């Protein structure tokens, strides 16, 4: 089966040149571009528009009765930010790499999946079952794209989620819990601090308690390591001569499979209340964001198919790994009950970074791997 290197390179560069930063969330143009390419390849394709300018690009092809494989990745990128040495939307090719925002996360995966679909369709091989490709909106913020797919009763026997994994087969990822802890004191003139209750002291003490807690998180996962917790933002106060009566602390907690959300939140609430009582303030804990951890059994069909495909492509035996970030696999596994893996070209160290890049070699290898997984799962007849 022939992989069209030039097609993959061209697709990656063109995708990078379409600005799909999120926020604000501007996937409409890129969704139309992807749907057009899917149609040209030979799939039934359409754009599913929703919300304020949001869109998913979806394509399907059914050979007949058999299994159903989902290839899923995302259209949006984080904002480009400042400090780039080249234009973040140029798709520059240099020294075997393609540069630009989204090159690794995850427009390279889109291009490689398109390249795999093109190779299979061009080959004329008759498979059994159906392949579904979905490039979704909003993975970088609230995952509204994949949630919409699930709400519309999308189903599959198994799925490959395109994210930068250095072509490794990742079968688990941590969950992400974002907590807002608010401390309420009493305002007063800064020249008479004894008349007020300074919420900064409570918030600061709470943050230091979080640091102590982080050293006590000893639970380990064989693929993901330990859970983590850290404060990421402290904000409060209204004026430089007023005792602040409200200060907020944002906490990032990475949760392992098997940890219970209720227990994690309860522990933080007790900690905040203890600090508040000592500091004569009021404390409030709210969940700002929750993406549950996800894990697929190592002996599942999709894991076996992916390990075989990657081992053959790389010329070495590979083992399942863990993915250190969260992604849309969470919703596929936990809500749609679809056994899933995470696999794609590029590295997490490049994702969200200045001068983001992906190697052309990995883009082509990823297409070979995706096509091999398709053949394995959908059982080629000839």
Image (tube, rainbow, N blue to C red):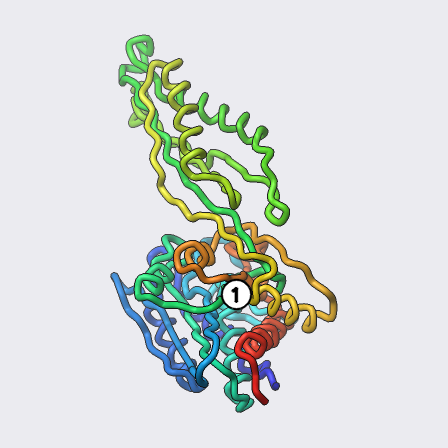
Please identify the residue farthest to the right as the structure is shown: 316
Identify the residue under disc 1: 103
Percent position (x, y) of residue 64?
A: 44, 84
Q: Quadrant of residue 34?
A: bottom left
Q: Quadrant of residue 234?
A: top left
Q: Is residue 247 above or below residue 350?
A: above
Image quadrant holding the C terminus, namely bottom right
Q: Is residue 210 above or below residue 1?
A: above
Please identify the residue farthest to the front as the structure is shown: 65
Query: Residue shown at 38%/53% (left/top)?
Result: 141
Percent position (x, y) of residue 35?
A: 38, 78
Image quadrant holding the N terminus, namely bottom right
Query: In screen coordinates, is 295 left or right of 362?
Result: left
Query: Can the viewer see residue 207 in this picture?
Result: yes
Percent position (x, y) of residue 56?
A: 35, 68
Query: Can the viewer see residue 9 in this picture?
Result: no
Percent position (x, y) of residue 45?
A: 36, 80
> Crowding near pointer 1: few (<14 within 10 Å), some, many (20+)?
many
Query: In screen coordinates, is 245 left or right of 42?
Result: left
Query: Residue shown at 47%/68% (left/top)?
Result: 157
């Amino acid at each position: 089966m022939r992989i069209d290197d030039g097609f993959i390179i061209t697709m990656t560069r063109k995708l990078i040149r379409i600005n799909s930063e999120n926020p604000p969330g501007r996937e409409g143009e890129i969704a139309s571009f992807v749907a057009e390419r899917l149609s040209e390849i030979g799939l039934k394709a359409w754009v599913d528009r929703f919300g304020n300018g949001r869109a998913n690009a979806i394509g399907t092809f059914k050979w007949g009765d058999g299994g159903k494989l989902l290839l899923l990745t995302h259209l949006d990128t984080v904002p480009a930010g400042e400090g780039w040495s080249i234009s973040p939307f140029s798709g520059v090719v240099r020294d075997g790499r393609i540069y630009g925002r989204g090159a690794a996360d995850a427009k390279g995966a889109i291009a490689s999946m398109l390249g795999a679909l093109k190779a299979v369709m061009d080959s004329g091989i008759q498979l059994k079952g159906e392949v579904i490709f979905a490039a979704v909106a909003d993975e970088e913020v609230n995952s509204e794209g994949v949630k919409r797919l699930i709400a519309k009763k999308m189903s599959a026997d198994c799925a490959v989620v395109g994210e930068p994994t250095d072509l490794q087969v990742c079968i688990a990822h941590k969950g992400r819990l974002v907590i807002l802890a608010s401390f309420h004191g009493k305002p007063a003139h800064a020249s008479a601090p004894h008349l007020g209750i300074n919420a900064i002291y409570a918030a600061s003490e709470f943050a230091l308690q979080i640091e102590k807690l982080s050293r006590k998180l000893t639970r380990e996962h064989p693929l993901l390591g330990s859970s983590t917790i850290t404060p990421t933002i402290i904000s409060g106060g209204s004026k430089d001569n007023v005792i602040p009566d409200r200060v907020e602390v944002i906490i990032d907690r990475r949760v392992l499979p098997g940890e219970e959300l209720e227990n994690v939140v309860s522990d933080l609430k007790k900690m905040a209340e203890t600090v508040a009582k000592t500091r004569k303030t009021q404390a409030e804990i709210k969940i700002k964001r929750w993406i549950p951890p996800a894990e697929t059994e190592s002996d599942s069909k999709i894991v076996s198919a992916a390990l075989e495909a990657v081992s053959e492509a790389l010329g070495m035996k590979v083992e399942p790994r863990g993915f250190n970030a969260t992604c849309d696999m969470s919703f596929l596994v936990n809500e749609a009950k679809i056994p899933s893996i995470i696999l794609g070209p590029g590295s997490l160290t490049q994702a969200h970074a200045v001068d983001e890049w992906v190697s052309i070699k990995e883009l082509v290898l990823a297409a070979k791997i995706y096509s091999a997984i398709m053949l394995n799962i959908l059982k080629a007849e000839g």
